[in-house]
Image (spheres, helix red, strand yellow):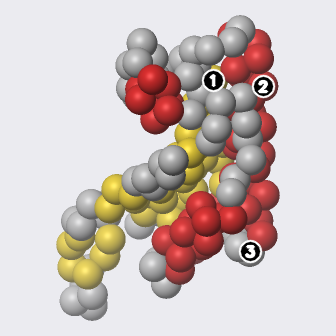
């Protein structure tokens, strides 16, 4: 079964004094993991890099990694798993040549789930790390 990769891109902008449109939107790319895993498969890795390629001025963004787990397993295990997922994504971003100081990491473990953990599909969607691009304040 292939889990669909979600990408949220909000098209919002304004014109600066030179007349160029400035991106003011936050962009999110989710990477999904198997239960108890922090392995990023080659397809998701390639899709992450293609997504990053769509931002020609990537240095104009702050990068945040937010990692999550479902509620299967203990709280401490899920926290370590969340940290492992963040590290795996962080390594992919460094491989893409992003600067370490441009990347912030937030590990939520099983806390603050976006989806309900009382269903199979909710747990699948909570096993993820989100890469968030936020425009740098001007």
Task: Report which residue position mark 1 lands on.
Answer: 109
Q: Residue 59: x, y in percent?
A: 57, 74
Task: Residue at 43%, 53% (x, y): give it.
Answer: 4
**On screen, residue 11 above or below 78:** below
Q: What whole-number distance in Å separates the C-alpha atoms at marks 1 and 3?
A: 27 Å
| N-terminal label among 2 and 3 | 2
Which quarter shows the C terminus? bottom left
* Pointer 1 local density, CA inside 10 Å: few below 14, some 14–19, many at least 20: many
> Can residue 99 be seen by looking at this rendering?
no
Residue 25 lies left or right of residue 79; in this view the side is left
Q: Is residue 47 above or below residue 30?
A: below
Q: Which residue is mark 3?
A: 97
Instruction: Looking at the picture, tell me which residue is in the foreground, 112 or 5.
Output: 5
Contact between labelled residues 3 and 2, with CB atoms less than 8 Å apart: no
* Image vertical order of residue 106 relative to residue 22, above or below: above
Q: Nearer the viewer, mark 1 or mark 3?
A: 1
**Which residue: 34% across, 56% down?**
8
The secondary element bearing badge 1 is classed as strand
Q: Residue furthest front?
A: 1
Question: Toward the viewer: 48 or 19?
Answer: 48
Q: Quadrant of residue 37?
A: top right
For the point 70% across and 20% down, the residue is 78
Which residue is label 2 attached to? 80
Q: Are marks 1 and 2 in contact (CB under 8 Å)?
A: no
Residue furthest out toward the bottom: 18
């Amino acid at each position: 079964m292939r889990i669909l990769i979600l990408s949220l891109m909000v098209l919002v902008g304004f014109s600066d004094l030179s007349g160029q449109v400035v991106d003011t939107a936050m962009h999110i790319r989710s990477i999904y993991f198997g239960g108890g895993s922090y392995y990023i498969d080659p397809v998701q890795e390639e899709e992450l890099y293609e997504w990053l390629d769509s931002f020609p001025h990537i240095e104009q963004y702050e990068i945040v990694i937010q990692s999550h787990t479902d509620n299967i397993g203990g709280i401490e295990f899920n926290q370590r798993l969340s940290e492992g997922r963040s590290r795996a994504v962080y390594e992919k971003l460094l491989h893409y040549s992003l600067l370490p100081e441009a990347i912030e990491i937030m590990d939520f473990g099983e806390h603050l789930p976006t989806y309900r953990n009382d269903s199979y599909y909710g747990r699948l969607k909570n096993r993820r790390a989100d890469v968030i691009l936020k425009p740098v304040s001007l």
